[in-house]
Amino acid sequence: MSNSQQTTSQHQTRTTDSDQSLETTSGETVEETEEAWVEYDFQGDAKMVAEDLDVYYGDDHALKGVSMEIPEESVTALVGPSGCGKSTYLRSLNRMNDRIDAARVDGSVQLDGKEIYQDGINLVELRKRVGMVFQSPNPFPKSIRDNIAYGPRKHGDIETGLLARMLGRDDSEEERELVERALKQAALWDEVQDRLDDNALGLSGGQQQRLCIARCLSVGPEVILMDEPASALDPIATAKIEDLIDSLAEEYTVVIVTHNMQQAARISDQTAVFLTGGKLVEYGDTDQIFENPQSQRVEDYITGKFG
Ligand SMILES: Nc1ncnc2c1ncn2[C@@H]1O[C@H](COP(=O)(O)OP(=O)(O)OP(=O)(O)O)[C@@H](O)[C@H]1O
Ligand SMILES: [Mg+2]
């Protein structure tokens, strides 16, 4: 898989300034995009809605006019070549781009119909509702138990320790239950129940990633954003993460970036294909995208002709 620098150096713009829809990477067909390709009719409610979303890093226009509705309690896959803006889009869904100095976001993102890009939004609360799991497992260098309890403690949902006891509050039992529940949900409990006080860094990569998912679940999110969560894992650990994602979609809205087309086809209900230039080119039912895409470029991408 090429990295973003390689992609940038391959960039060819075969267009006039007024029409950026024809911006392509070498090897791609030149094609006008059609708005109808990104309209996705689904049953049920949208959990998140992006409208005319643009993201800039300084002068670099990384994401262009993305409008997309994300159905609740389902798995949405984001695919596309390196550098096309998948991570940028994912981060815009819980305002993680706010942490990048050069980043500027225009447009709208709603969570349950409420604008997240408005003044007065509590970002801690937003990121509790819209949690994130990263590409490389990043457990804290603390015990397995403390990794899970950290978020609920920080949010004040559980209070333990000497001070809490002096104030007449001790949620140790709640904490024990919460840790067990999150680890069971993340399909890790059986492997770690006897070593909860061991350092999390002693777990295998696949276990660490499930721990990070458990940590994300421990604060009670509604949406879980995952940026290539299995790309650093072996096939067995990957299969465990895929099974887990499948079960999470019964209760949560999962949005996952993956470079693995088979994985997207296996685990997602709908797939959004981003292509060079930061545009969402096609979005629809995963079966339709993989079996009968409307865009020639999307077909070429998913069949491995470029990217
Ligand atoms: N923190 C940043 N500062 C400046 N530019 C950035 C930053 N993050 C991303 N970009 C640029 O924005 C564009 C989109 O990057 P992004 O990381 O969203 O792509 P991606 O689709 O996730 O790629 P990959 O598949 O390689 O992870 C690229 O041109 C990238 O160089
Ligand atoms: Mg990325």
Image: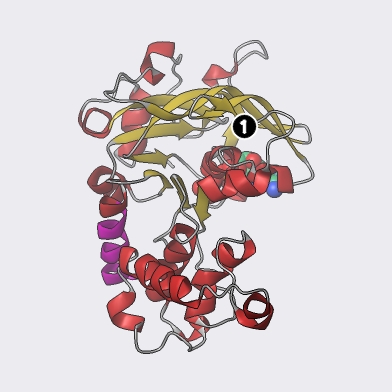
At label 1, the amino acid type is Ile
Residue 150 horizontal/vertical position (percent): 58, 69
Up/down of 201 relative to 78, above or below: below
Q: Is residue 239 covered in magenta?
A: yes
Q: Which residue is mark 1?
A: 116
188 or 128, which is in the foreground?
128
Q: Residue 206: name its quadrant.
A: bottom left
Residue 36 screen position, x and y as percent? 38, 12
Report the residue that reaches farthest toward the front. 168
Residue 26 versus residue 92: which sits nearer the camera? Answer: 92
Q: Quadrant of the C terminus?
A: top left
**SS for dot 1:** loop
Q: Is residue 9 visible?
A: no
Q: Is residue 122 above or below residue 155?
A: above
Which picture quadrant has residue 83?
A: top right
Asked which colour scheme the image uses, the reply is: secondary structure
Rendering coords of residue 122 (x, y %) = 68, 42
Which residue shows up at 59% across the image and 43% down it? 126
Drawn side of residue 218 relative to residue 192, left or right: right
Name the residue at 26% across, 51% down.
246
Front residue of this view, candidates 138 and 198: 198
Residue at x 44%, y 44% (from the top left corner): 222
Is 62 inside the magenta-drawn segment?
Answer: no
Q: Residues within 10 Å of mark 1 (few under 14, many from 20)?
A: many
User: Where does the magenta region start and end?
Assistant: 232-245
